[in-house]
Amino acid sequence: MAFLGQSSGATSIRLGMRRLLAGVAKAVTFVQSEGMRLVSELLPKGLYARALIIIIAPIVVLEGVVAFVFMERHWQAVTSRLSEATARDIAALISVYEQNPSEESASKLIEMAREKLNLQMSILKQGDLPPARPKPFFDLLDRELSRQIATQVSSPYWIDTVGQSHLVEIRVKHKDEILRFVARRSQTYASNSEIFLVWMVGSSVILLTVAIMFLRNQIRPILRLAEAADAFGKGRPEPPDFKPRGAREVRQAAQAFLEMKERITTHVEQRTTMLAGVSHDLRTVLTRFKLQLALLEDTPEAISLRGDVSEMQHMLEDYLAFAKGHGGEEAKPVKLKDLLNEILDEAAVLGVDVQLKTRQRKDIVVPLKRHAFKRAVSNLVSNAARFGETVVIRAATERRRLRIEVDDDGPGIPPEERNHVFEPFYRLDVARNQDKGNTGLGLAIARDIARSHGGDITLGESSMGGLRAIISIPL
């Protein structure tokens, strides 16, 4: 029983250790993921800034390593040797003075120190050493000179490396006298080391300036390609001076973009031409139907046939409009208020109350494919008027985007169906009935036109209790 108790305790300890290790592993993983996320947020997102970091970071690291090695090896070693030589000269002068402390010998010693050792020496007959001064922040000279004097001279001493910037003062206590020595800073300190740092930093700045200039020239073709692709995606003309330039890979990408643009444009033109021919042929047949029906008497059958022909023509127009998309129309500056007023005037025949509200007092000028965009908004207005009694159109600009809202007080659309209503030929059975000549293409055409401008259409809840359709396109 005791053996079983010990085994159970060991098992509990192992389980506890496993849980502890698992907790530590989770904590480390969390810290790593948070660190990577923070680094990702702090790093610049643009190619130009990232390329600059790739160029600048190695140079800064290299300069830091070189400067550290230089300071640690050369600068400190030279300063130590100079301080050691000065301390030996001071120790030798003190030793000679101790052997013959007469005034005549002292004057000769002072002259020899000035002429041979380049040291200013003076003898203060009475007094004590000054109090210790605070150490400088960068105390390489103070530290090395103190260490060397303490090694060479056994008497109490005091040094000042902070006072006059080009001189160093050393005082040594000798019996009742104070021996004062003044040396130039260059005798004890590797003062020409800053020249190396200046040359290193200066040459790095020049090299970085040249690299930045070349890098900017390499990035500019990529930015021009992005602008051209963005303009093509929004249905706008590309910059007039755009052409393949820059590095070989960038030129290849620009050339591939131009070829793709040409193929897409040719395909759209061919499809538009073919549909125009089909439209002409079908409209000819419908015109014959109308002429034949006009010769018939106004019987119930003839009236029904006229309604079917009219509905067929309406459906044909919707199908062709959806198949053509935005056609070959080019985007041009359009006054939005004038365009919305036209839509408002045309909506008067819908038999519902249609209102227009804009936030900006000044005219909003937006590059649009005028006829296509007008059709998109008209489709939303007619769709709202079909199922509501009041329609409100709102227009505003925010965050470099144009936002147009169409609200109605109709039954609305369930949230789960809002993505499906943009599918071609999709019609709801409950909220939006299909007994009013609805072909199921109005919203699909509107979204296609909005996306051809680089934007989109979303649906939401209206403040009037019905549906809100929002067109958002970049300015």
Image (tube, helix red, strand yellow):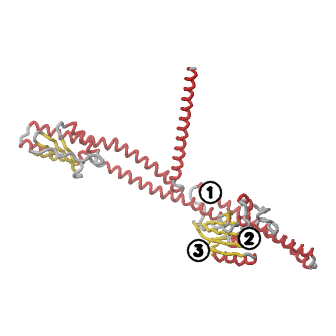
Mark 2 or 3, nearer chain start: 3
Quadrant location of the C terminus in the rendered image? bottom right
Mark yes or no: residue 277 visible. no
Amino acid at dot 1: Ala
Q: Residue tagged by mark 2?
A: 388
Label at residue 360: 3
Labels 2, 1: front one = 2
Whether label 2 touches label 3, CB < 8 Å = no
Give 473 or 109, whichever is nearer the viewer.
473
Outermost residue, front direction? 1
Q: Residue tagged by mark 1?
A: 253
User: Which residue does the image show at 14% across and 37% down from the upper left?
Assistant: 95
Q: Counting other residues with Cα less than 10 Å from the Cα at mark 3, is it few (<14), some (14-19), or many (20 or more)?
A: few
Mark 3 or 1, nearer chain start: 1
Labels 2, 3: front one = 2
Q: Give coordinates of residue 90: x percent, y percent.
A: 17, 41
Amino acid at dot 2: Gly
Labels 3, 1: front one = 3
User: Which residue does the image show at 59% across and 55% down from the upper left?
Assistant: 248
Q: Give coordinates of residue 27: x percent, y percent.
A: 53, 41
Q: Secondary structure at mark 2?
A: loop
Q: Counting other residues with Cα less than 10 Å from the Cα at mark 2, is it few (<14), some (14-19), or many (20 or more)?
A: some
* Mark 2 and mark 3: Cα distance apart in space: 27 Å
* Mark 3 and mark 1: Cα distance apart in space: 41 Å
64 to 459, vertically: above or below: above
162 to 9, vertically: above or below: below
Label at residue 402: none
Q: Give coordinates of residue 304: x percent, y percent.
A: 89, 73
Give 277 or 317, whichever is nearer the viewer.
317
Q: Secondary structure at mark 3?
A: loop
Quadrant location of the N terminus in the rendered image? top right
